[in-house]
Amino acid sequence: MGFLCVIKSRAEHPLPGHTLRLKKAHLSETLIINLYESSERKYHMVEIENKGVLLEPKYDFEKGGVFNPACVSVGDEVRMYYRAVSENNISTIGFCKIKNDEVIERQDSPIFAPEYDYEAKGMEDPRITFIDGIFYLFYTAYDGKNAQIAYATTKELPHFQKQGLLLPKITYEKAGELFKKTDLSIRYKYFEEEYQNANGDNALLWEKDAFLFPEKIDGKFALGHRVLPGIQIVYFKNFKELTKDFWSDYLTDLDEYIMIEPKFWFDSRNVGGGCPPLKTEYGWLLI
């Protein structure tokens, strides 16, 4: 299940768009979104055309399932990077090309596979953005205990160069100390305790669902990510800024960078971002 919304940040660098009402945005030939029909916020399901299954497990590395793809258009083709799960439950990232709703080329082995300790048990849920001549691919790196955000870059598809973890290793114990300086809801404390109880005192901040906005805002990258249970946004001029001190300062003010938190019955535990936001005349559309 997905949730659709138009977002406007409370952060220092506001997002374009000054309305929280999206009446109708035509995003493709088969997708019409009717989110807020009126100021009373009458919700509608997304209307889609079922075109059948595009990709099914075929090779050994993906026998456990294929899902959660990142897609980018190149000419008249779509390049798809998808999560592939093996029979022993290790995730890698597969690759294929799509044209006219059909797979025209597909690799018989992962294009991304675990190489480092922090991703030893899987590389999950890729998201891809093209900005300033560079493709950025974010994914969840799982070591069997902790989930962290990692990324890779390239100027020419399909292959990427891994750039490592986006955040330094920050424990929930340390994050909890920083969160005490904020006005975060009690829900954040709940997840802090949950993951410490499950993974021990050295449990790292559980980070997933990172996505990069497809254009800079006030000259800065805008990155969405998820510290449970909400979706937050962080701004930076270049990736070299993302030091431990940077993240410590950011987490101290995390309540100022929240885009969305759980609100309704269907998202009562937590929310997380999907594909990179889509720009509309009403603002940025987040799914």
Image (tube, helix red, strand yellow):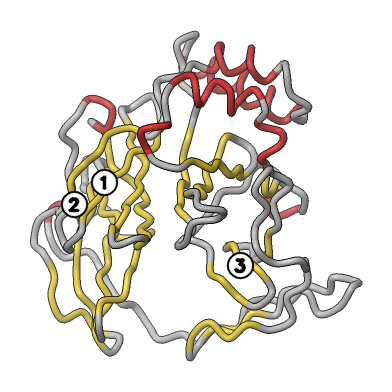
Q: Is residue 57 left or right of residue 216?
A: left
- Of residues 149 and 44, the one drawn nearer to the viewer in this rendering: 149
Which mark, by number, is residue 152? 1
Q: Answer yes or no: do the residues labelled 2 and 1 have beta carbons within 8 Å?
A: yes
Q: Which residue is mark 3?
A: 285
Q: Residues within 10 Å of mark 2 (few under 14, many from 20)?
A: some
For label 1, the SS is strand
Which mark, by number, is residue 160? 2
Up-down relation of residue 282 to residue 170 (above or below): below
Q: Quadrant of residue 182?
A: top right
Q: Residue at x 66, y 40 (%)?
A: 257
Report x, y in % for residue 101. 30, 86
Q: Is residue 86 left or right of residue 19?
A: left
C-alpha span from label 2 to label 3 = 27 Å
For label 3, the SS is strand
Q: Residue at x 69, y 74 (%)?
A: 282
Residue type for callout 2: Phe
